[in-house]
């Protein structure tokens, strides 16, 4: 299939809405990462997402809506915690897991009785969603297992020929996926740290349950899996990511670079001035490293605060070695 490249103008946004209406796939930017969108009501299109992304069929998709009124067709109830979080963080980088309305959208939710919903804030995403007037399911725009796409070149690399259209408009706000929080029960549970920090969420709903194995290597498959997506290897560039942790992380990194790597190895050391910069740049840097044939990416872990928690989570999953 030939993939159209679209720009941020009203004619192209209208074109993308038409494509979605006809059951096609459109890659569009959000304030977090790029998503591969399909009209949620079209099963054939939803199946197309799993295929284009090579995504396992048991990993459910996030529903994106342009207006809160669409929630009624998706969820069974909106409890007080959910309401408070929606009021504070929608539109924005927070995905909420609700009890699903029975019998709907089984394909995209992988038959679960819960459903993930997000109301994004970025201009293009909102215009598409409001224009279509229907929920759009959209996973991050990358082939499964690879780093999420935050730049046009990267999503084009992965998905050209697999989708009907791709917007050529880079993400500049977060560059890290939305935070996923389960509000389907009495307690609020963190499923995936991301663009909205845990501190910000706790300021609204009080203590949030954080899984013990959140920032642990998932090598031990016997550990309880809290979110379907968390059992898969994720965010990995072709280069080996070596993560350094602890008070001596900087020193350990230097030692490793000098003593453990051969002269011929192509090495990239990632350094960021702030977590915000790291968030915007990290996935893009992974992709660039692959294009440049880098063998090793060396990086120091982040602290658990703010965007740091989500960044650390992605690094843990991407790392082939953690040195502390
Ligand atoms: O920022 C984002 O969230 C991006 C943009 C495009 O919106 N989307 C995204 O989607 O990251 P994806 O599919 O790459 O990640 C969605 C995560 C997966 O880990 C999936 O397992 C989880 O959300 N998820 C979806 N529905 C769920 C459910 N009902 N219960 C638990 N986890 C769910
Ligand atoms: Mg993803």
Image (cartoon, rainbow, N blue to C red):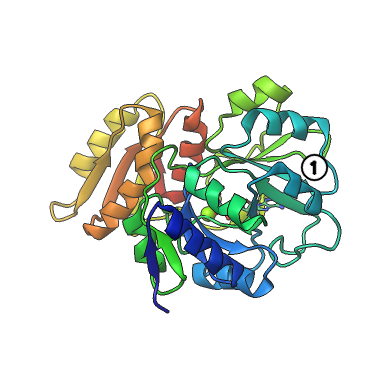
Q: Quadrant of residue 46?
A: bottom right
The answer to which of 11 and 244 lies nearer the viewer is 11
Q: Quadrant of residue 96?
A: top right
Quadrant in the picture for the C terminus: top left
The answer to which of 82 and 222 lies nearer the viewer is 82
**Where does residue 70 sit, x and y in percent of width and height?**
74, 49
Outermost residue to the bottom: 1
Taking the image as shown, residue 310 lies to the left or right of residue 56, namely left
Label 1, residues with CA under 10 Å away: few <14, some 14-19, many ≥20? many
**Disc 1, SS:** loop
260 versus 23 height, above or below: above
The answer to which of 265 and 277 lies nearer the viewer is 277
Taking the image as shown, residue 286 lies to the left or right of residue 190, namely left
Quadrant in the picture for the N terminus: bottom left
Identify the residue shown where x is 27% and y is 29%: 251
**Where does residue 301 sit, x and y in percent of width and height?**
40, 34
Residue 91 appears in the figure: yes
The residue beneath circle 1 is 184
Outermost residue to the left: 263
Identify the residue shown where x is 66% and y is 50%: 227
The answer to which of 168 and 77 lies nearer the viewer is 168
Q: Number of marks in the image?
A: 1
**Where does residue 293 sit, x and y in percent of width and height?**
22, 59
149 versus 49 height, above or below: above
């Amino acid at each position: 299939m030939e993939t159209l490249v679209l720009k941020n103008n009203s004619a192209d946004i209208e074109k993308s809405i038409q494509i979605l209406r006809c059951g096609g796939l459109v890659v569009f930017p959000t304030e977090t990462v790029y998503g591969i969108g399909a009209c949620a009501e079209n099963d054939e299109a939803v199946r197309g997402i799993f295929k284009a992304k090579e995504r396992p069929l048991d990993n459910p998709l996030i529903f994106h809506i342009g207006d809160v009124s669409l929630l009624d067709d998706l969820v069974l109830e909106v409890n007080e915690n959910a309401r408070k979080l929606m009021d504070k963080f929608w539109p924005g980088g927070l995905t909420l897991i609700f009890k699903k309305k029975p019998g709907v959208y089984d394909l995209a939710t992988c038959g679960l009785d819960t459903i993930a919903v997000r109301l994004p804030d970025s201009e293009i995403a909102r215009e598409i969603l409001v224009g279509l007037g229907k929920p759009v399911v959209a996973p991050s725009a990358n082939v499964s297992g690879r780093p999420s796409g935050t730049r046009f070149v990267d999503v084009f690399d992965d998905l050209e020929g697999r989708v009907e259209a791709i917007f050529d408009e880079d993400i500049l706000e977060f560059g890290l996926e939305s935070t996923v929080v389960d509000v389907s029960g009495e307690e609020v549970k963190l499923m995936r740290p991301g663009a909205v920090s845990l501190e910000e969420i706790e300021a609204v709903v009080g203590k949030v349950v954080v899984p013990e194995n959140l920032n642990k290597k998932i090598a031990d498959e016997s550990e309880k899996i809290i979110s379907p997506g968390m059992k898969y290897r994720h965010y990995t560039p072709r280069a080996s990511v070596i993560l350094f942790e602890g008070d001596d992380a900087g020193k350990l990194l230097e030692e490793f670079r000098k003593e453990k790597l051969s002269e011929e190895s192509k090495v990239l050391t990632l350094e960021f001035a702030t977590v915000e910069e790291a968030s915007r740049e990290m996935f893009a840097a992974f992709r660039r490293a692959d294009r440049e044939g880098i063998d090793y990416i060396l990086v120091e872990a982040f602290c658990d605060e703010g965007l740091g928690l989500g960044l650390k989570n992605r690094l843990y999953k991407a790392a082939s070695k953690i040195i502390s």
